[in-house]
Image (spheres, rainbow, N blue to C red):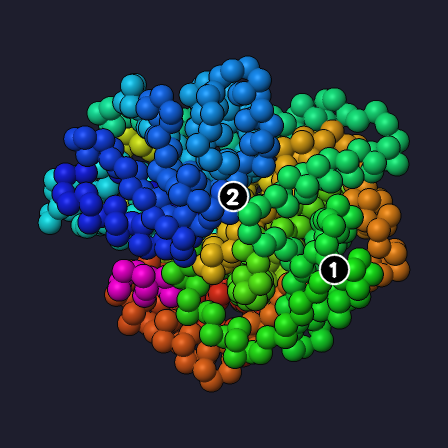
């Protein structure tokens, strides 16, 4: 796990600026730093290292291939690199290796087989910058599901820095790009409405105009003179889902559970390999318990597991997690955090993410990461189970509601929806949601409507676009400004309605919220996280399963439960899920955080920034305090305002 950065066509002090980019993400790689540049400095690559495999200097980056043609700066892990290395040696495609790192394996495989073919054979998580010295071409690539972040784009003309107008830049951390001399890309107002819907900014967009997120499964190619780019897909979640549902697994549910267990065991075994201590997060849930059970069953020693205990019973899963750990025989660490511990995290969140991000579970996720990092350098996570195995109850409830709503004639639903929608202006969120759902045209549209946040009228300048000097780059994108996968998903793509909802989440919510949250909060304390359920073979198998193997009415993750119950008694797991939550909205009413919040929502500050309607925000805050409504929207605005405040002092 590391951080990468670089630029092309930089005309100023390149050494100072690449150093600044790398320093800004020191947390991603505290074990070392490296820089490589072409002779004319037209291409510069930077790297911060968190040493996981091959701790020696032989694993340092940027790394040059043995034949001298390729240079790589890479963030992530290739779990099947040993098999790839054996293939290279068996086919006499590589001479003796200098070290044992997966970076060297990846680099020599690229030299032997080509970049795209190696990405297809690699199983892992990664963000890669590869420079082909012979073709004078820079490649960027991101892993299949979006575990590792990668930002790229061009700098905006600045009156004090005109020489670097149009320079191509990239980094693992958006803050690294924003730290460059003369960075002046304006806030991307086109995406603010969607930020207010979801609480995060979905790929390919970032909070800055002209700066983008590379989407999962994509390769970007920029060829000298580095003023044009091409993007291609080497793996597609949507295509995988479509193919999988056409080629359904033909065995019984029990046979499916055995095959899933085999694939998970193989994935977990590969992800337990490291030259540093490895552990796992453990909640009381199905997903993390399954991962830990399969880890312990393959380990010759007690697996290190970690749980954060909450002080309020309604949020506390630690006692159940402790029982699960005792049953499995892990070396369990349980730490109870105080309210003060959690509150202290809030002002640090803007720097962790580099742009507005408002999933409040970011707070406990960071706290468990911090505790885990005190004991190990790598931690396995159970993320992905809900989206792959139909775990969210929302999938079932939306399907059930749609089956009722679609029977009502459209001539009645449309005006009723509009009438109920007026409730959004009165603070009656429940009635407003009913109005939105009533107006749905399909189950996918209903799911989209269920996710839309209220208070969208708060954005004061969302229709006003600043001067655009990014036309060339915007033309590369497949979606119009501000549109997301949720907006453009083709209704009825998959036969089973709930499969479509899962796919929608895997295309946007999972990479842009869940994986983003885990990566940033863990890497803030230099902890590498690995997600075995997102292994390529596991994902592809999950899409081949009939929906009936995943959900039975209100019970999701059936086949995953079948695997887990071989290791943990059913009665230990069949308890109400409490979730990974905190009493955030109680805190925001108490003096310390209320003062912080009201400072960020000061009307004069909002008017000066010109992005939010100060009058509307004040009404929301007053309603929030008095009526306990607008909870998501208040947190979304506060996280945006905290980011904006930090941005003024360069984060």
Q: Position of residue 344 (x, y in %)?
A: 47, 74
Along the line of sight, which residue is nearer the eye, 348 or 410? Answer: 348
* Residue denoted by label 1: 330
Quadrant of the rendering where the C terminus is positioned: bottom left
User: Looking at the image, how many numbered discs can be counted on the residues?
Assistant: 2
Of all residues, the one furthest to the top in this rendering is 91
Relative to residue 568, is residue 647 drawn left or right?
left
Q: Is the magenta region chiefly helix, strand or loop?
A: helix
Closer to the N terminus: mark 1 or mark 2? 2
Residue 204 pos. (x, y %): 43, 39
Q: Residue furthest bottom?
A: 591
The local secondary structure at tag 2 comes to: loop
The residue stretch that appears in magenta: 641-651
Residue 649 lies in the magenta stretch: yes
Kindly report the distance in space between the C-alpha atoms of the residues bearing marks 1 and 2: 24 Å
In front here: 55 or 224? Answer: 55
Specify the quadrant of the image occupied by residue 562. Answer: top right
Q: Along the horizontal axis of the image, is 72 left or right of 126? A: left
Circle 1 SS class? loop
Left or right: residue 177 versus residue 303 is left
């Amino acid at each position: 796990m590391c951080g990468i950065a670089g630029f092309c066509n930089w005309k100023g002090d390149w050494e100072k600026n690449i150093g600044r980019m790398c320093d800004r993400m020191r947390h991603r790689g505290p074990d070392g730093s490296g820089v490589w540049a072409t002779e004319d400095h037209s291409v510069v690559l930077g790297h911060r290292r968190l040493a996981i495999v091959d701790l020696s200097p032989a694993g340092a980056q940027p790394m040059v291939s043995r034949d001298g043609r390729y240079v790589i700066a890479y963030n992530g892990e290739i779990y099947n690199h040993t098999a790839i290395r054996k293939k290279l040696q068996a086919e006499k495609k590589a001479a003796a290796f200098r070290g044992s790192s997966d970076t060297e394996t990846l680099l020599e495989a690229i030299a032997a087989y080509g970049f795209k073919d190696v990405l297809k054979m690699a199983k892992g998580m990664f963000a890669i910058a590869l420079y082909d010295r012979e073709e004078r071409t820079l490649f960027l690539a991101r892993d299949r599901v979006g575990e590792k972040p990668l930002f790229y784009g061009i700098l905006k003309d600045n009156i004090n820095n005109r020489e670097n107008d149009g320079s191509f830049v990239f980094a693992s951390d958006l803050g690294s790009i924003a730290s460059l001399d003369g960075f002046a890309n304006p806030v991307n107002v086109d995406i603010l409405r969607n930020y207010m819907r979801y609480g995060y900014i979905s790929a390919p967009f970032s909070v800055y105009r002209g700066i983008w997120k590379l989407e999962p499964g994509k390769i970007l190619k920029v060829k000298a003179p580095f003023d044009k780019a091409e993007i291609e897909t080497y793996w597609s979640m949507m295509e995988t889902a479509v193919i999988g549902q056409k080629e359904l697994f033909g065995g019984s549910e029990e046979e499916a559970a055995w095959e899933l267990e085999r694939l998970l065991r193989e994935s977990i075994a590969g992800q337990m390999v490291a030259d540093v201590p490895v552990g796992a997060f453990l909640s009381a849930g199905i997903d993390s318990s399954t991962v830990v059970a399969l880890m312990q069953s393959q380990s010759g020693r007690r697996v290190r597991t970690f749980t954060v205990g909450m002080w309020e019973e309604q949020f506390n899963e630690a006692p159940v997690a402790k029982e699960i750990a005792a049953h499995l025989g892990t070396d369990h660490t349980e730490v109870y955090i105080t309210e003060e511990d959690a509150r202290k995290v809030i002002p640090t969140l803007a720097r962790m993410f580099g742009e507005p991000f408002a999933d409040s579970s970011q707070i406990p996720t960071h706290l468990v990461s911090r505790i885990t990092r005190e004991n190990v350098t790598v931690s396995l996570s159970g993320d992905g189970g809900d989206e792959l195995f139909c775990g969210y109850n929302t999938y079932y409830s939306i399907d059930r509601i749609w089956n009722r709503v679609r029977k009502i004639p459209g001539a009645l639903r449309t005006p009723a929806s509009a009438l109920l929608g007026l409730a959004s202006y009165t603070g009656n969120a429940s009635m407003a949601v009913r109005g939105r759902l009533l107006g749905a045209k399909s189950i996918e549209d209903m799911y989209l409507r269920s996710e839309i946040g209220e208070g969208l009228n708060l954005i004061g300048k969302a229709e006003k676009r600043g001067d655009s000097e990014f036309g060339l780059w915007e033309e590369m994108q497949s979606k119009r400004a501000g549109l997301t996968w949720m907006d453009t998903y083709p209704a009825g793509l998959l036969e089973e309605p709930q499969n479509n909802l899962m796919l929608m989440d895997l295309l946007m919510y999972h990479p842009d919220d869940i994986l983003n949250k885990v990566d940033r909060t863990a890497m803030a304390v230099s902890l590498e996280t690995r997600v075995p359920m997102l292994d390529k073979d596991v994902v592809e198998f999950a899409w081949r399963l009939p929906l009936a193997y995943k959900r039975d009415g209100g019970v999701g993750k059936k086949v995953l439960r079948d695997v887990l119950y071989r290791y943990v008694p059913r009665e230990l797991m069949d308890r109400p899920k409490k979730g990974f939550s905190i009493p955030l909205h109680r805190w925001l009413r108490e003096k310390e955080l209320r003062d912080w919040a009201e400072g960020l929502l000061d009307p004069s500050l909002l008017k000066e920034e010109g992005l939010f309607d100060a009058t509307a925000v004040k009404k929301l805050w007053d309603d929030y305090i008095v009526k306990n409504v607008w909870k998501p929207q208040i947190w979304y605005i506060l996280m945006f305002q905290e980011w904006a405040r930090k941005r003024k002092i360069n984060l």
